Amino acid sequence: MSRPDLPIRAATETVLAHGITPDRCDILQDSSTLVLRLTETLVARVVQDVDGPRQGTEWFARENAIALHLTQQGAPSIPLHPDLPPGPHEHFGFPMNFWLYVTAIEAEPSPEEVGRTLQECHAILRSFDQPLPRLAIVTESLALLEPLERRDLFPAEALELLRRHLTTSLEALDRFPHQPLHGDAHLGNLMNTTSGLLWTDWEDSFAGPVEWDVASVIWNAKLLEDDHETVNRILAAYRDAGGVINEEALHHCLIARAAVISAWYPILYPRPDAERQSKLQRRLDWLASV
């Protein structure tokens, strides 16, 4: 049985075991995570890369707990599917969870909506009372450098640059107030839908400064695209919605975000095209300049 046939079977057998009969199998995404629409309202996310850097169901368990809290408090976030236990589920060794299908619309969200909805999520996340690891993605990225070095996936000078910035970032960001965060709040994890602008993909959630999520959502516009108008509108909307941004923390988070994404590039994009390679080099060049 070839992939993704086995992950599809894992998802369909899991929903059948909970009394739901799939009436379709639309593949919405086929990468390290397989995203399937199995009924009119049901979407499955199945981890296919079971030998990747993240093992087991810990990440989905964290995501599920966050998603349930956000849904219960009316946050702008895609809900877990109400007709299955939240899980996480695992079948044939594939971790998975199940979400309510939402209908995307083509309209681009305004910077004001982006800033406002991020602050709404942050305000609700402050009441999430389950423990989360501190600065998890930064710590994880620092540990990732050793296997990258063994596999010769980065030049020595690039690895040293990333190691220096990640180590410094852990020390710097530990000084600022921490709260539950999205963890990977880029625009690709934000969907404009018929139900409004909704955040998704909470598996990277950790405790850290809110400026981490803010830096994540503005990084490309600020440092790759020189789109300062969009950046300023997002920041203004975040503040207008009640958010507080410490400029020093934001600076450190921009550096940390660049180092984290650079470290994960060989994992996320094992065969990067020319555009991806250019973006990585520009991140490394920027890190070398700060």
Image (spheres, rainbow, N blue to C red):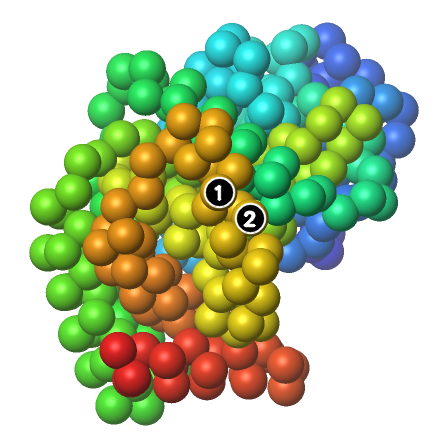
* Residue at figure coordinates x 44%, y 53% from the top left: 216
Q: Quadrant of the C terminus?
A: bottom left
* Residue at figure coordinates x 16%, y 42% from the top left: 176
Q: Nearer the viewer, residue 202 or 98?
A: 202
Q: CA distance from mark 1 to mark 2?
A: 5 Å
Judge from the rendering whether residue 233 lies leftward or rightward of residue 107; answer left or right.
left
Q: Nearer the viewer, residue 21 or 152?
A: 152
Q: What is the x, y in percent for residue 88?
A: 48, 25
The residue under label 1 is: 236
* Tags 1 and 2 touching, CB below 8 Å: yes
* Residue 153 placement: quadrant: bottom left
Judge from the rendering whether residue 211 lies leftward or rightward of residue 177; answer left or right.
right
Q: Secondary structure at mark 2?
A: helix
Q: What is the x, y in percent for residue 159?
A: 26, 81
Q: Amino acid at mark 1?
A: Ala
The residue under label 2 is: 233
Is any atom of residue 130 visible in this view?
yes
Q: Is residue 222 above or below residue 100?
A: below
Q: Amino acid at mark 2?
A: Arg
The numbered disc on residue 211 is: none
Q: Is residue 287 above or below residue 118?
A: below
